[in-house]
Each structure stands twice: as structure tokens, then as C-alpha cells.
Image (cartoon, rainbow, N blue to C red):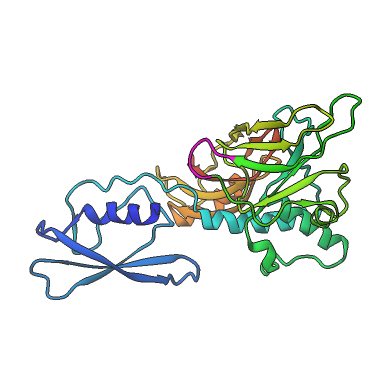
Amino acid sequence: MYVAARERRYLDALRGPSGEPITYKRIGALLAPDGHTILDGYEVTYTGLDKPITLYLDAYHYDDALKAPKGFVCAVPIALNPPPPDAFLALSSLMKLAIEQGAAKDFEPIPLEPDVSSAHGFILDYFRVIARASRAAAASSTPIDPKNPPRDLIRTQMLVVAYPLRCGDREPVAPAAIEIVPAQGEAPRRDGDLASGGALARLLPGMNLPAGAIGATYPLERPRPSDTIKISYPEGGCGAANDVSLPMKYTNARPLKTPAPGLPPGQGATDRPVRLQALIDADGTAQQIVYIGGPEALTAAAIEAVHGWTAEPARLNGAPIVIPVLLQVRFGRTP
């Protein structure tokens, strides 16, 4: 929804050439000549105009030097901040990265506790679900094509696994239910039934799980920062019925080394940054880098510079997670 809101703010700043108020309506969308950017069409008119003018707006790229189209003026400054990361681009980039990195690397599950003990179980976020599938496919000599992944991988999902409750020397008590409890709003619905025994083993081939463990799949990329995962245990060897509530602990990614690149030879000085969208992976490096805005002639140099940047990755309960970010690259003088 932020796309439509940004487009309206842009259009609301426009007037006719003599300051005439404009009216506009959205008339549809089409692909830009690059073959993947979506353009939204708006029919714009004002008093005295012979026929409406169609403007095509690109809400997925951004430049600091926003201007009125030819034939219009700005009634007020077009005050738009850079857009947030494009969620659709981020999700497709995450899938590609998980397939590529998962084929050659194992990613440890995310513990349910912030102390990294995994005493109550673990989470496989969407990245780890795909990475595990890619690892298994590579091991069986049937690697997944990042450009044409299986349909079941396209569906966003995460897996929460709960372990039996241990009470000293007593017999462990198997969990009975898993819930995600939000701080506000509705709880996300579980995708299908709880899995246990052979069904859970088929979801996690090759993983050594304790007897009595259960799993729940949710249509989320990962738990939300305000979510709490609740595991319910029935009355049994540990005494009365028990509910264990496990809040999620997130830490943000932070830059460690971001040297400013010099201008490539032949490029004039500019104070306009190049804006890029990327994923910060579990090792703190930028991956799947895509141009978002700024001087296009500096795109290749900006991407090359970002490949040399390093960051502390974002973490969930101490485990590194892959997140989308917007990066701003400013250039110094010509080397």
C-alpha cells in the first residue's frame, strides 16, 4: 500500500502550467521497457486541457531530484523520503540467495531461546527452509534452478519445532501444541496440522530429533519482533499442565566497514547518492544487489564498492538472519 500512497503524494503536489488544480485517476499498470519494473498509469486533467494526459509513475525507483513532468508545475515541494525495501523484490532475492548458498552450506536452526540453548526447540525461517531443500537437492545431484524453483518453495513458510519438556530425572513430557501469540492483532493461522513422528521426519530429513517432538508450519517468513511462541505441555511427569512462553529477541544489522568509493575516471562530481537494495546475509555481506535510484552511470561502481562493505548481520535469538536493506553509496573524488 505504500506504493499508492507515495504516488498520491507526488500527484497531489502537481498543478497545471498556470497553477490549475488537477484531478487524476488510476487507469492500470504495465511493464516498463526493462521487462520487470511495474509502471502505474494515471489519467490527469485540469480545467482548459483539451484531453487528459497520461502519466506513468515508477514507485520502485527513487531519486533525490524529483521534478514535475513537462507541462506541469509543483504547487508545493515534492517531499518524498526514499521508499522502504520492496517486499516483492526482497522475497524473490531471498529465495535465489537461499538456493545458491544452501547448495554449498548448512545453516544452523534458530533457537527458540535468546540464550541459544535450543532447550525447547528451534525455528527454520523461510531462508533456512529453502536452503535445506537446496542442500538436499544438491546432495542428490538434482540441484534447484534459482530461476525456476519448485512450486512448493515459492510459498512463504517457516517451521517451528518444539521439544519434549525435561524435568530432571523424570520422563520427558511431549508437547501438545504450538501457538504464535502476537502482542496485538490476530494470531497467524497454522498451515496444516501439527506434525510429529514420521510426518515431522519427512519435513526434516536427516535431522536428529528427540522422540515426542512436534512441528508447526506458518505462512510467515519468520516470527515478527513482537511475537511470542507458546508451547503447551499436558499434565504429566513434570506435574501440572505447563505453558512455556518464549518471546523473540531481535537485534538489527549494523554497518562495520563502508568506505566511500572514488568517482570512476570520466565521471563528474555529484552529491547525489546511488541507492541500492540488497540482502545482508548471515556472514554480514551484501548479496543480490539491485539498483534503486540515483546516477545510473555510477551503478556498476556503486555495486562494486558495496561488495567490499561488511556488516554485523541481523540476529534472531542470537542466530544470524538474512534481511533486506536499502544502501546509499556516496562518491568521493576521482581516484
Q: Residue furthest top?
A: 168
Confirm whether the magenta stretch covers residue 3.
no
Q: Position of residue 326 (x, y in %)?
A: 51, 45
Vertical comparison of 79 with 1: above or below? above
The image quarter in which residue 3 lies: bottom left
Q: Along the line of sight, which residue is nearer the eye, 50 or 94?
A: 94
Q: Along the line of sight, which residue is nearer the eye, 317 or 331?
A: 317
Which segment did they paint magenta?
Answer: 181-186
Vertical comparison of 236 with 334: above or below? above
Q: Residue at x 10, y 59 (%)?
A: 20
Q: Residue at x 53, y 50 (%)?
A: 277
Vertical comparison of 141 with 132: above or below? below
For residue 179, say whether it is visible.
yes
Left or right of 194 on screen, residue 202: right
Q: Residue at x 78, y 30 (%)?
A: 117
The image quarter in which residue 314 lies: top right
Q: Position of residue 76 (x, y in %)?
A: 19, 47
For residue 313, say whether it is visible.
no
Q: Residue at x 23, y 46 (%)?
A: 77
Where is the C terminus found, in terms of image quarters? Answer: top right
Q: Residue furthest bottom?
A: 51
Q: How many marks?
A: 0
Q: Residue furthest right?
A: 169
Where is the N terminus found, in terms of image quarters? Answer: bottom left
Left or right of 317 on screen, residue 172: right
Q: Main secondary structure of the magenta part?
A: loop
Q: Along the line of sight, which residue is nearer the eye, 261 or 8?
A: 8
Q: Position of residue 329 (x, y in %)?
A: 50, 43
